[in-house]
Structure formats: C-alpha cells, structure tokens
Image (spheres, rainbow, N blue to C red):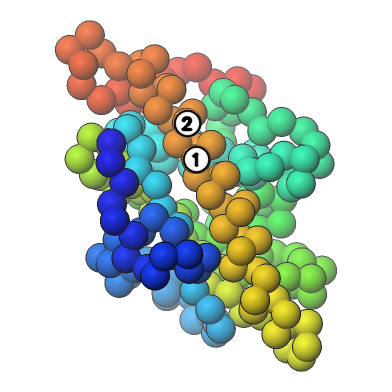
Amino acid sequence: MRFPRRADPLGDPRSWNVTEAERHAQYPCDDLGFAFDDTYFRATSIAAAPPTAYRWLCQLRVAPYSYDWLDNFGRPSPAELTAGADALAPGQRVMHIFRIASFAPGSSLTIRLGSGSGRALMGDFAGSYAVVPAPGGSRLIAKVLVRYPRGTYGRLLRVLMPHVDLFMFRKQLLTLRRYAERDALRDRPPDGSPGSPGSKETS
C-alpha cells in the first residue's frame, strides 16, 4: 500500500504522513472545548480491515506500543490482543497517563492527559485517533491538540515537543500497523478478502 503524499512542508514535525483532506477533517477532539496552542497530525496506512485496525487501537488501554524502555517501564507491549481491551468506557486509563474522553466503537478514540504532574512536565494534551476505510485496508489518523506551559519552559517545549512527539508517535503507529497487518494475514479467509479481528486474545 502506498502512503499518500504529505500535505505538510517537508520536515515539519507537526504533521507526518497525512493528506490535506485529513488535516482539514473534523475529529471528536475538536468538540472538547480544549484551548490549545498547537496541533499535530500523524497517520499511517494499514493493510487490514478497519475492525482489525481499531481492535489494535484499543490495545492502548494496555500499553503505549511505542518505545517500551521509555514509556512502558521497560515492559514489552503485548504482541497479542488482550481480552477485554476493546470494552471501552469514558474515564478509563490509556497509555498510563491519559484518560478516555469519548469513543465511537470501530471508528474513533478520543483521549486527554489525566495527570496533573504530566501537565506540569509536558503541558496539556488531548487528541483523537480515527480509523477510516481506505483502498486496501484502512487509515489510522491521529490529531493531537497541545497546550504548552507558560513562561520560558513553555517556549522551549514549543520547539522540542513536536519532535519528541513525532519520535514516539511514529513508532506507536507503525507498531500497531505491524500487528494489525500480521493478524489480517493470519485471519484472512481462503478467498483472500480482508479479515476481521481474530480470536487470538490473551487474558
């Protein structure tokens, strides 16, 4: 599957692998009434049906799926689906420091930073993941709204945070993509049509 041409200027860390249409689309986080200073966009194409991609997105309740030595206390993010991880509810913890603000089963997950100490360190974050059908599978798109701390530290974060976020976010999306595509191949029917989420879940 070919990635779309990036709509953002080459090298802009605030926008990675998104189309112009994806940048201008509406996402659930836009309705949070969140006062923000900056916006990041990240996306990847997945050769798996949307239900499979979304099921792996739900795994963020279990682990961050980025660089485990940095954001998962050195523990490996599970390589198989965790039973019940897709039973979402507002307020549930996601990636240790976020909380679910809202969700639409099979299509979106909206989260907000839930830790006061996290806000002091990084600023405030809210964002939505969206899974949409695409030729050959699906697109996993993330929009992130950022409010930086005030003062000199906040001005420093305005420069550094887009790069740090892209470093972690790209790894996360590519990891979720890898597992979703693996499961799609493993569960594909004999006729070759895209598979739905498999039953290989661990408790």
**Helix, strand or loop under label 1:** helix
Write down the quadrant of residue 141 in the picture: bottom left
- Image quadrant in which the N terminus is located: top left
What percent of the width, then of the height, locates residue 149? 72, 82
Q: Residue 8's image quarter?
A: bottom left
Q: Residue furthest top?
A: 190
Residue at 70% x, 76% y: name it: 157
Q: Nearest the camera: 149 or 34?
A: 149
The residue identified by callout 2 is 178
Residue 102 pos. (x, y %): 48, 60
- Of all residues, the one furthest to the front in this rendering is 10
Q: Is residue 29 left or right of residue 85?
A: left
Q: Which residue is mark 1?
A: 174
Relative height, residue 35 to residue 145 (above, below):
below
Give the residue type at disc 1: Leu
Above-or-below relation of 63 to 146: above
Given residues 82 and 91, the one toward you in this image is 82
Q: Is residue 95 above or below residue 54?
A: below
Q: CA distance from mark 2 to mark 1?
A: 6 Å
Residue drawn at the location 64% of the way across and 78% of the way down? 158
Q: Quadrant of the C terminus?
A: top right
Residue 129 located left or right of residue 75: left
Q: Which mark is residue 101?
A: none
**121, above or below 64, in the image:** below
Q: Is residue 201 visible?
A: yes
In the picture, measured across the screen, residue 191 lies left or right of residue 25, that is: left
Residue 40 pos. (x, y %): 49, 68
Residue kind at label 2, given as amino acid type? Arg
Would you say residue 101 is visible in this rendering? no
Circles 2 and 1, Cβ within 8 Å, touching? The answer is yes
Q: x, y percentage for residue 105?
A: 39, 47
**Closer to us: 177 or 195:** 177
